[in-house]
Amino acid sequence: MVLYATGFNAWNQLQFETPGVDEPDDISSFTCVLQGDDDDCIRPFFSYTRAHDGKDTFNQYPSINALLSNNDQPHRFSDFPNITQLVAYEAGFAALSSTGNVWTWGDERYTACLGREPTASSPAERPGLVSDLDDLPTGPITKIAAGGYVLAALTAGNDLYCWGHAGRSTMLDDLSDDPNPVVIDDKDILDVAVGESHMLVLTTDAEVYVVGDNTNGQLGLPGTDSTTSWTRIDLASVLGAGETVTGVVAGPRNSFLIAQRQSGECQ
């Protein structure tokens, strides 16, 4: 595995194999920051980044009730199936089941992020099924991503759906409160990542597209403040010989490319 990173670096959170400095600069273009055999699971947070070998399946949540309860007012959600992914955005959460169903819940002031209409029986603050993501033409949802006030879902057939609060996010021109398909140069989408105000996608032909804010260099586009149109990264100028991007990850204000290669050193 070879990890490339760009963006916010105020706490040296992008410095893996080089010594940190007292006043680090942000990184403005994708730069090789780590290489290893197994560290292919990256968890970025605002002030640090965790690289994990993937042996512990810490992204699996067999007991959602334990995560969604508190001592003062415990909650119990009946008929909640096995959860394979749980993500957080600025005002709530989304969960994906092993059968491809998506549930959302959060702050009732930002119902646009729910992708569903809250009702008396399914209020905003309790998990509710996003029915618009059921029975899609290209199969069930296999991955969800969220950040800021935007959520994304990827189908088994490599279609991308997005929704969110357009008043709080300007990264997508046609963002609405209903999950809608996103077309990017007629490409099939293999992976998606959402940051605080930016997004990345990886296509099935190993191309990377970015959109949104670039104030901290999180898009890897030097000289660009932001973009509301999907822009392809010139991977030929980023990757080493024989490398292919296999995944994308977004922190709040930075981005990561996971690449695989047979051998070699960081370029």
Image (spheres, rainbow, N blue to C red):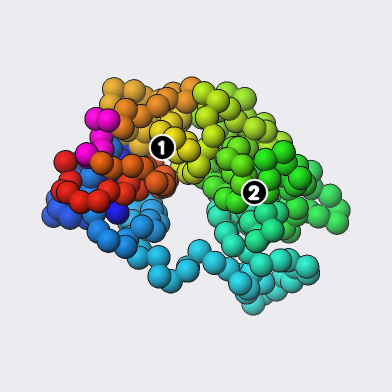
Q: Which mark is residue 107?
A: none
Closest to the observer, 75 or 64: 64
Q: Quadrant of residue 63?
A: bottom right
Q: Amino acid at mark 2?
A: Ile
The residue that label 1 is drawn on is 206
- The amino acid at mark 1 is Ala
Q: CA distance from mark 2 to mark 1?
A: 20 Å
Residues 119 and 53: in front is: 53
> Along the line of sight, which residue is nearer the eye, 236 or 164?
236
Instruction: Compare marks 2 and 1 and give the one earlier in the sequence.
Output: 2
Residue 29 locus on image (x, y percent): 27, 34
Q: Position of residue 166 (x, y in %)?
A: 61, 31
Q: Which residue is at 29% across, 22% downward?
A: 223
The region drawn magenta spans 236-241
Q: Residue shown at 60%/37% (left/top)?
A: 159
* Residue ID for mark 2: 141
Q: Is residue 237 magenta?
A: yes
Which picture quadrant has residue 225? Answer: top left
Q: Nearer the viewer, residue 199 or 91?
A: 199
Quadrant housing residue 4: top left
